[in-house]
Image (spheres, grey):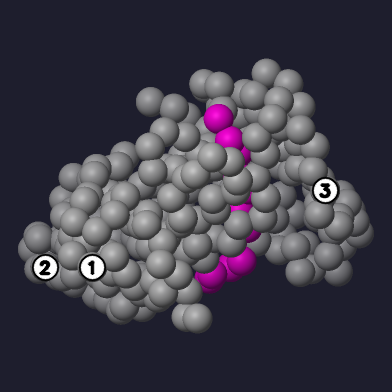
Amino acid sequence: GQQVMQIPQYQHVQEGEDFTTYCNSSTTLSNIQWYKQRPGGHPVFLIQLVKSGEVKKQKRLTFQFGEAKKNSSLHITATQTTDVGTYFCADQTGTASKLTFGTGTRLQVTL
Amino acid sequence: NAGVTQTPKFRVLKTGQSMTLLCAQDMNHEYMYWYRQDPGMGLRLIHYSVGEGTTAKGEVPDGYNVSRLKKQNFLLGLESAAPSQTSVYFCASSYSTGTSGTYEQYFGPGTRLTVT
């Protein structure tokens, strides 16, 4: 079956540093969604990417969909302590808009 | 709107016991899902439903059963709990797909289950 891997598994940065997580799939991705899960919380939707090469921005967050639709990335500029959490990519495909989640990247930000 | 709610929040079971997790949503969503989350493995789909009275298997359905008797509720049952079912369980719901648009999933707060 499809495997969606994220790297790194964990990253610890100082506040103000940049952060990037990469999402790679063994098969072509359909629609990529990104979710954030705060410690002890539940996943919350951030954004959806549909088109090859698509780039979307949300304030300090930049999301990119690869040209071949086999990878995606999330870049955070100048991290803040509020960015702490685990970031998941998920491929939305097939019937019922099912999601295949990536393994997640846990971000820790310290002052 | 409460969104997606789950009960209970925590539960400890002994091996072989049974239990039912309840998920309720007040957004009139057609689609509902049950996931389990284990460390380092992301979220994995257990079962899902595309509407009242319908259910289907996801990626890891063994040991679980589900029912969707009412549109707003989706129940997850464990008939004979095993330690391997120790996990955090999330319910989610979404609108059904139309022509185009973003159909994100809305998640409940989760149920932390420990099987000893």
Kindly give the residue lying farthest to the top in the view shown: A68
How far across and how far down the image is residue B24, in percent?
Answer: 34, 72
Task: Decide if residue A85 is on the left or right side of residue B52.
Answer: right
**Where is mark 1, residue-wise?**
B70
Amino acid type of disc 3?
Lys
What SS does tag 3 mark?
Answer: strand
The reply to the same-chain question for discs 2 and 3 is no
Marking on residue B2: none
Q: Identify the residue shown where x is 65% and y is 28%.
A: A71
How far across and how far down the image is residue A74, in percent?
Answer: 74, 43
| First reached walking from the N terminus: tag 2 or tag 1 | 2
Q: Nearer the viewer, residue A26 or B57?
A: B57
Amino acid type of disc 2?
Ser
- The chain carrying label 2 is B
Amino acid type of disc 1?
Lys
Q: Nearer the viewer, residue A18 or A53?
A: A53
What SS does tag 1 mark?
Answer: loop
Which stretch appears magenta?
A: A30-41
Marking on residue B18: 2
Task: Decide if residue A98 is on the left or right side of residue B82.
Answer: right
- The chain carrying label 3 is A
**Image quarter of residue A13:** bottom right
Q: Are marks 2 and 3 in contact (CB under 8 Å)?
A: no
Mark 3 crowd level (few <14, some 14–19, many ≥20, 10 Å Cα): few
Residue B31 among those drawn in magenta: no
What SS does tag 2 mark?
Answer: loop
Kindly give the residue lying farthest to the front in the view shown: B99
Q: Identify the residue shown where x is 59% and y is 61%.
A: A44
Residue A32 among those drawn in magenta: yes
**Where is mark 3, residue-wise?**
A57
